[in-house]
Amino acid sequence: MLPMLRHEQNWLPSLFNDFLSDEWPVVRTGGMTTPAINVEEDEKSYHVEIAAAGMTKDDFKIHVNDRNELVIFMEKKEEQKEERKNRKFLRHEFNYSRFEQSLLLPDDVDKEAISAKMEHGVLSVELPKLEPQVLKQPTRVIDIQ
């Protein structure tokens, strides 16, 4: 999927009306595992939650790339191996999960203050908003001649 461009300041469409439209800020998904994602906004920040049952914080890598995207990457490899003397394995189980999700960041996100935590099988990413710029009144009026 090609990267989506954001043309408006309001980057988060209505979840019910626009989830499948071309304006959703999802850029790409890689791998085979696609966990559920919630995105919410309040006055001070955006909140991203990802269902990650059975995962640990060490299974995730999160960064902001040079295209202003929040990239969430998860990879988990598990291997169940029983050591038994004088026996050969007829069945050897392993599990591999991989997930990558990129979300375009709105212009008002403070990229230096983004934080994440893993708790009760949910990865939560906090995207604080920048303080609105207040237009200052000029301190000196210049006469035009």
Image (cartoon, grey):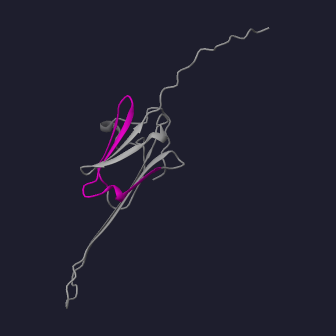
Query: For residue 60: magenta?
Result: yes
Q: Which residue is at the front of the view, 23 or 145?
A: 145
Query: For residue 47: magenta?
Result: yes
Residue 103 percent across, percent down from the top left: 43, 46
Q: Residue furthest bottom?
A: 86
Q: Residue furthest right?
A: 145
Q: Residue at x 42, y 41 (%)?
A: 23
Residue 96 percent across, percent down from the top left: 31, 67
Residue 131 percent across, percent down from the top left: 47, 28
Range shown magenta: 34-63
Q: Is residue 49 visible?
A: yes
Residue 125 percent across, percent down from the top left: 36, 44
**Quarter of the figure that contains the C terminus:** top right
Q: Is residue 92 left or right of residue 74?
A: left
Q: Which residue is at the front of the view, 18 or 145?
A: 145
- Answer above or below: position of 86 versus 101: below
